[in-house]
């Protein structure tokens, strides 16, 4: 391909280190699509004659069908997917195949292919995020009244509803969706026509190729076009943030499935056994989602570091952009699917959640709030009185709502029997009707709204 001034072939290791075909073959559909758009434009602009353009177009269609049926051949001597396709085209058409690369370089070609690939990858993730969010909202609706402890510092803080907890993740996924959608909008410009780095003297029609490939417009600067990998980095940062959210949810599933909690039971399809301990039922998928998030973060970091010192325009370092993106994609795709599958099928154990929610004097704030509301006590003083009630319960080895009225009145005479209306965990969550709060009525409305809204994400 660039043999004109070279006498010997490359050393075997040179060929191997130089080759990207083992991994960039994954972009074969995008590569052929880009070439078909390019050659149609060359023909339309009479940069090559119409007959050659048609024959090249047909040849590319033949190659596409062949690769679809038989896979992409890997020959490191052909370096990359671009040369693999072009060589196959030459075998089909002879010297006319060489007209395809008029007014183009592999630099704008690879930038175009990779943008198309990342765009498809994002579309897949957007669907998967939507699906997972819908599963979470559905489960939230089923469990709008189920009470579990809300934690701060992983210490029981206040009772919350399970639906509320699950909807917190829907909010995260909504932001993840938005980040991917933003990244998609920003990447949707076509670098084709930047050629090697400076543009071309041929009268190309960049608007036509951009449109044919579904881009919003051509990129504005030829140097930036071939050197920019922001779209890959934005893809990876969006993937990292999504993976991080999945990891937090996975961690909760792992914790909740553990015997001391016993808040969820994973079904057989989402559990694994142990080769030595027959009683085990392990949450491996959740653990791997948690683990994968670390790898995705590492892949993002890796490409950031690859890019940080590169002068304009193209450097071969940039060939290292694809594997981290492909790997992150596969890990995130699996993680999203696994989380949706687990969340859809796991069983929550409300009785154990409720028992835990009632522990740790989780309704102490409700007692303080009652003193403020019903007896006009300043909050700071109410906090103090409640602390004494908690101490009394601790000493008696009871829950707050098991203290007698006499005991409570001995702590503060303004307390009356009305206090028992607010000390249960159900009363506590039901009272939290502030917008965005955990009350079952709020959660039902929020889950219903989320289910509707998720359909409109796009
Ligand atoms: N395989 C190359 C890559 O992925 C294609 C671009 C090659 N360009 C070049 N100037 N050698 O980056």
Image (tube, helix red, strand yellow):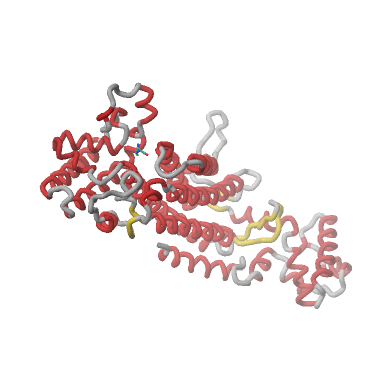
Pick the quarter of the image with the C terminus: bottom left
Pick the quarter of the image with the N terminus: top left
Taking 364 as reference, is 60 above or below it?
above
Q: Quadrant of residue 441?
A: bottom right
Q: Is residue 59 left or right of residue 170?
A: left
Q: Is residue 204 left or right of residue 161?
A: left
Q: Nearer the viewer, residue 261 or 59?
A: 59
x, y percent for residue 368: 78, 68
Q: Quadrant of residue 388?
A: bottom right
Classify the position of ligand 1 by quadrant: top left, top right, bottom left or bottom right. top left
Taking 34 as reference, is 148 above or below it?
below
Which residue is found at the position 84% from the left and 65% from the top?
A: 384
Which residue is found at the position 43% from the left and 37% from the top?
A: 317
Does residue 288 appear in this view? Answer: no
Q: Quadrant of residue 279?
A: top right
Q: Nearer the viewer, residue 416 or 320?
A: 320
Q: Nearer the viewer, residue 159 or 152?
A: 152
x, y percent for residue 242: 50, 51
Which residue is found at the position 89% from the left and 68% from the top?
A: 410
Taking 263 as reference, is 92 above or below it?
above
């Amino acid at each position: 391909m660039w043999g004109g001034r070279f006498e010997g072939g490359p050393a075997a290791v040179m060929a191997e280190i130089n080759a990207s075909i083992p991994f960039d073959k994954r972009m074969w559909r995008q590569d052929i699509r880009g070439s078909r758009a390019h050659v149609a434009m060359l023909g339309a602009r009479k940069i090559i004659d119409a007959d050659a353009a048609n024959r090249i177009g047909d040849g590319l269609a033949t190659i596409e069908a062949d690769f679809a049926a038989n896979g992409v051949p890997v020959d490191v001597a052909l370096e990359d997917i671009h040369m693999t396709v072009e060589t196959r085209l030459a075998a089909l058409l002879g010297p006319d195949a060489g007209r395809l690369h008029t007014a183009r370089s592999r630099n704008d070609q690879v930038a175009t292919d990779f943008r198309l690939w990342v765009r498809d990858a994002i579309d897949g993730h957007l669907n998967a995020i939507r699906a997972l969010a819908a599963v979470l909202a559905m489960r939230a609706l089923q469990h709008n009244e189920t009470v579990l402890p809300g934690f701060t510092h992983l210490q029981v803080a206040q009772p919350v509803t399970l639906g509320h907890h699950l909807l917190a993740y829907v909010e995260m996924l909504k932001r993840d969706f938005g980040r991917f959608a933003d990244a998609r909008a920003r990447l949707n410009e076509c670098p084709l026509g930047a050629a090697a780095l400076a543009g071309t003297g041929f009268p190309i029609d960049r608007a036509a190729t951009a449109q044919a490939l579904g881009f919003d417009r051509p990129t504005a600067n030829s140097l930036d076009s071939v050197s920019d990998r922001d779209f890959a980095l934005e893809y990876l940062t969006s993937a990292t943030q999504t993976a991080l959210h999945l990891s937090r949810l996975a961690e909760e599933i792992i914790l909740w499935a553990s015997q001391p909690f016993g808040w969820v039971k994973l079904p057989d399809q989402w559990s694994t056994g142990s080769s030595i301990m027959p009683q085990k039922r392990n949450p491996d998928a959740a653990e791997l989602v948690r683990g994968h998030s670390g790898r995705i973060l590492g892949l993002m970091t890796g490409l950031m570091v690859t890019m940080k010192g590169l002068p304009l325009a193209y450097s071969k370092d940039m060939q290292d952009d694809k594997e981290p993106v492909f790997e992150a994609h596969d890990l995130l795709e699996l993680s999203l699917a696994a989380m949706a599958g687990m969340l859809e099928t796991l069983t929550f154990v409300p009785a154990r959640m409720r028992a835990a929610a009632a522990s740790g004097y989780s309704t102490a704030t409700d007692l303080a709030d009652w003193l403020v509301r019903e007896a006009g006590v300043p909050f700071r003083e109410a906090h103090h009185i409640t602390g004494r009630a908690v101490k009394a319960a601790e000493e008696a080895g009871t829950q707050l709502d098991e203290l007698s009225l006499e005991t409570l009145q001995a702590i503060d005479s303004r307390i009356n029997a009305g206090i028992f209306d607010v000390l249960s965990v159900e009363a506590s969550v039901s009272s939290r009707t502030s917008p965005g709060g955990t009350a079952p009525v709020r959660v039902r409305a929020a889950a219903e709204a989320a289910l509707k809204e998720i359909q409109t994400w796009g």
